Amino acid sequence: MAKIIMMAGIAGMLASQPAWADQGAPADEDQDMIVVTAASTGTKTETPLVELPQPIKVISSEQYLSQGAISISDTVKYAAGVLANPYGRDTRVDGFNVRGLDALQFRDGMRDVFSYYASITSDPYNFSRVEIVRGPASVLFGQGSIGGLVNLVSKTPDFETRGELNLVYGSYDRKEAMGDVNFALADNLAVRFVGRVRDADTYVDHVPDDRMMFAPSIRWKPTPDTDIVLTGLYQEDDTGSTSQFLPIVGTFLPNAANPSGRLDKYTFVGKAGWDRYNGRSLQGGGSITHNFSDAIKLNLKARYIDSDLEYNTHYADSYSNPQDPFSVYGTDGRTIGLFAGANDARMNVFSTDNNFQIGFNTGANIEHKLLVGIDYSWNKVAKRSADDFDIVDLYDIDYDALPTFEATGPFTTDSQKQLGIYVQDQIRFYDRVSVVLGARRDRVTGSSGQKDNATTFRAGIIGEIGAGISPFFSYTESFLPVAGRIENVDGSFGDPYRPQTGTQYEAGVKWQPAPSTLVTATVFKIKERNRVLYLAAGGTTQSGELNTKGFEIEASHTLPGNFELLANYGYSKLKSESNTSLDYMPRHTASLWSTKTFGLVDEAQLRLGGGVVYSGKSVSTSDIWSIVTPSRTTVDALAEINWTNWRFALNATNLLNNKYFASCLARGDCFIGAPRNVMATVGVRF
């Protein structure tokens, strides 16, 4: 209650400030540029970014494809406070870290991934934009990461016939065709087809990157107030693992016992043709939006996911003795244990989110946008596996001698149901000050019988004080159920784990001197409770706390002549009890991206772009040693010619071919960053 009273007091002070005189207001058409409805991820309503008391990053598909993104992880690397691919490029899963913590992935506002290695990665070409919410977001989205979430917004039809086809050839014999075609069948009926076919290798031998993706959708407006959208997806991936879990000794650190030197950073550890990460995903969803009036709006949506996966892999025993893993198996500095695992997984997910949006006034200058909703999700993940172990010469693996086997036996199934009810009120005072208040109640039930209930709150305020300057403050909460029970030292089990809970305080300022410029600076402090601690004497407890504080600044600016500039910096410092098994992350991240368009002859245009991404050094510590991964900097580049309906583009990521380590962990293994990748594209629009 005290937090809400404080918010209301600040709102009153801001609303009472005299408005600054309009100093050269832009034309009406420019005013439309600030209304970015993509910010719906932050509030589940269409709200301009400058009216949200939190930093929301919206990345259009045009932007991330221009930057050479080939995975969802790549789409977020030019965002403040976000670390993309923290363990290097991983063909199995998308990885991103927000404010020092792993972020959850959502699709169209509903959670997309529920278990590691039970589904395949999403295709960036299938989405119109990517939205990043920093900090806890449980009030609107239920159980989730305290660091934030990444929401993928699917391409859907509109009522204009158009399309594009692209052919791509690139590094590692990448060959692919992509298409995005929208047909307006009538004034109120349209269909859209998005697809990709790819045949490609990767920088790790015997790891392909093949994909077939087809995403149809249909949109029907039976009345001007009713909008119905149905979406589908079929995707099949045939790939492997670019993460080979190579030992620190022999890669990042020298192997003193072996005069042969260091291993190749991209060494393949496995059996060609057997090691694989092959999966199929089938999805269907739909949404209905109906406006009962200008003030009352109903939103209904649901999605079902059916996923099958086969994952076979080898990895070296880098862990029994991280400081000298070869000594465990001999004295030649070459021999090491090699684990093998064959795994099958099936994942089924049903999600639905439904809400009413009601607009009303409580005075001549006080507007409300009330949101009341209920969401429900059910997921089931079934897995089975088989294991093997060999001893090999890691410097000269006899691949033919490695045995093959398949996962056998019954599937072990875990399931979970979540039901949430939420309410939110966005209050706009004198068209200058916005207050957001929200609350949610969740009930989560697991297949083991474990039941968790949680209530979360949020409150925030933002107001323009003049010259496009809008300070803001917010308070948000999160919760995340933890499966399992407390493990005692004697091996017995006690009470079920309590949900992890988190709180965040954040203050900042948004500055928009013109529709083409937006600068956001923010400071935050996060506390997460009930982390599971693994005790040195054995067993676990759940008294762990994680404290994170940091600072972020991001700026976007467009100048006349089609000049674009994006600049971002993030700092986050994590502090926790020892032995929490918390993965380390760099404190500093920064990025800069810019493009410029030049006119050529015959109406042709040349577009040049370049970017730099920096990640600071990071430290991983265990009971026996600390490993420092050096800072790394990569450069990306774009050259593009547009002529009539044709597009010719050349993209290069990691242009200078910096062969860096994305991370090395004190547990014993290292992960390599992706080397240079060049792609040439020929496309036609119609």
Image (cartoon, rainbow, N blue to C red):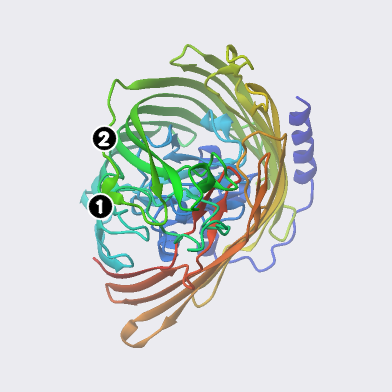
Question: Quadrant of the rendered structure where residue 568 is?
Answer: bottom right
Q: Is residue 517 visible to us here?
A: no
Label 1 crowd (10 A; few <14 / some 14-19 / many >=20): many
Q: Is residue 38 above or below residue 487?
A: below
Determine the secondary structure under disc 2.
loop
Please state the horizontal and vertical placement of residue 598, each as a whole percent of the image: 44, 82
Q: Is residue 484 above or below residue 149?
A: above
Please state the horizontal and vertical placement of residue 276, each as a whole percent of the image: 30, 45
Determine the secondary structure under disc 1.
strand
Residue corresponding to mark 2: 405
Question: Quadrant of the rendered structure where residue 559 is?
Answer: bottom right
Residue corresponding to mark 1: 195
Closest to the observer: 60 or 533? 533
Considering every residue shown, the one lying at the far front of the view is 331
Q: Is residue 193 above or below residue 482?
A: below
Please state the horizontal and vertical placement of residue 609, each as a whole percent of the image: 47, 73
- Which residue is pictured at 56% across the width and 44% down the height? 133
Closest to the observer: 390 or 125? 390
Question: Quadrant of the rendered structure where residue 488 is?
Answer: top right
Using residue 570 as the reference point, say whether residue 636 is left or right of it.
left
Label 2 crowd (10 A; few <14 / some 14-19 / many >=20): few
Please state the horizontal and vertical placement of residue 21, each as a whole percent of the image: 73, 61
- Which residue is pictured at 53% across the width and 46% down the height? 327
Q: CA distance from mark 2 to mark 1?
A: 34 Å
Three-letter amino acid code at disc 2? Phe
Considering every residue shown, the one lying at the far bottom of the view is 601
Closest to the observer: 241 or 289? 241
